[in-house]
Image: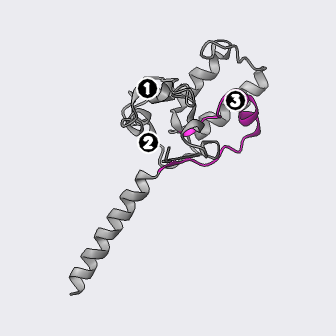
Amino acid sequence: MKKEIVLALAAMSLVSSAALADEGVRFPPIDHAATLKECGTCHLAFPPQMLPGRSWEKLMSDLANHFGENAALDASARDDIANYLASHAADGPATKGGAKYIAGIAKDAMPIRITETPYWIGEHREIKADRFKDPKVKSKVNCTACHSTAGKGQFLEEDD
């Protein structure tokens, strides 16, 4: 009898873990004022855990050509933000469990588009491509269109 109870509890635990995993992803909220101000003015300040440090370094090194926009900053602000992003990147010293976000990215690769990382693609594999063209969504980088709490680092599954 005890064995059956233990097995039942173990099974319930697995089901609960799977259900929680399906709820979405939670990152620590960004609490770095310069990142929130400079990055969050034009778009969601993306959680630094979404990319490896080398990607953030590459992205920050050419802000004059930031996805077709000039997002150049003075050296002090750029360095401050770059240091924050690098230390909180998926492979940064302040990040626990970040390896899952950069799994599948070659060690020498420096992706700068979060939407092209294996993790992002895997999390969105069930979303049809036209969903991102919906006028309410507009593009893959408009996270808040589908994840209303993305600004708090919570990319939760939401009903339409």
- The quadrant of the rendering that contains the N terminus is bottom left
Mark identifier at residue 99:
2
**Label 1 packing within 10 angstroms: few (<14), some (14-19), many (20+):** few
Mark earlier in primary sequence (1, 2): 2
Q: Which residues are magenta?
A: 24-49
- Which one is nearer the viewer's eye here, 84 or 159? 159
Residue labelled with disc 1: 130
Contact, CB < 8 Å: mark 2 with mark 3? no
Specify the amino acid type for callout 2: Ala
Question: Which numbered dot is residue 38?
Answer: none
Residue 38 painted magenta: yes
> Percent position (x, y) of residue 51?
51, 33
Tell which circle, 3 or 1, labels the residue nearer the N-terminal end.
3
Residue 76, image x and y in percent?
78, 25
Residue 71 visible, this angle: yes
Residue 107 in view here: no
Number of the front mark, 1 or 2: 1
Residue 39, which numbered label? 3
Helix, strand, or loop for circle 2?
helix
Residue at 45% over, 39% down: 101
Q: Secondary structure at mark 3?
A: helix
